[in-house]
Amino acid sequence: MEGNRVYTQSLHFLFGKNFEGATRIVDQRGVSKISAHPSGRFIFQVAGESRRKEQYLCFAENFCACYSFFYDVVNRGEQLCCKHQLAARLAASLGSYAEVKVSDEELALLLSRI
Ligand SMILES: [Zn+2]
């Protein structure tokens, strides 16, 4: 569809190579949404693309635990976000993520290890 193509090109313009990486991660079902009960708070866990297959905890809007987030986004200000954040946003809008349920205590423990 023409509209989709224009939209994809805009995303590509905004996010560059991160957009390609993010779509690959989403295609490979690399995004999990970790939801805590009873609070309903959640965080995304996103698979990295290197051979070590690390997983990064990631708030779609404002934080990722990966190196690129600190180096390219925070330190140099060259990117709006890292590809894991982008993957989390894409997965959230497409509904294509695995859902993981944890307790609030478990979520707090996860966050304390970032
Ligand atoms: Zn990241």
Image: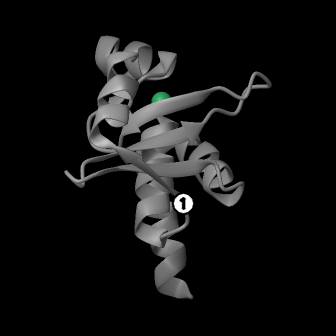
Where residue 75 sits, quadrant-wise, is top left
Relative image position of residue 89 (x, y in whole percent)? 40, 54
Task: Give how far across and how far down residue 35 sits, in percent.
Answer: 36, 51
- Extreme residue toward the bottom, this view: 1
Tell me if residue 73 can be seen.
Answer: yes
From the viewer's side, name the closer residue of 9 and 91.
Answer: 91
Count of marks overlaid on the render: 1
Q: Is residue 78 visible?
A: no
Tag 1: Cα neighbours inside 10 Å, few (<14), some, or many (≥20)? many
| Percent x, y of residue 42 | 31, 48
**Position of 40 compared to 76: left or right?**
left
Answer above or below: position of 91 versus 107: below
Question: Looking at the image, is 67 positioned above or below residue 6?
Answer: above
Left or right of 107? Residue 50 is right
Q: Quadrant of the N terminus?
A: bottom right
Q: Residue furthest right?
A: 51
Pick the quarter of the image with the C terminus: top left
5 left or right, relative to 53: left
In terms of depth relative to the viewer, which is nearer, 85 or 38?
Answer: 38
Query: Could you tell me which residue is drawn at 59 percent across and 31 percent down?
Result: 55
In percent of the image, x 61 and y 55: which residue is there? Answer: 26
Does 81 sit above or below residue 97?
Answer: above
> Secondary structure beneath disc 1?
loop
Residue annotated with mark 1: 97
Q: Amino acid at mark 1?
A: Tyr
The residue drawn where x is 54% and y is 40% is 46
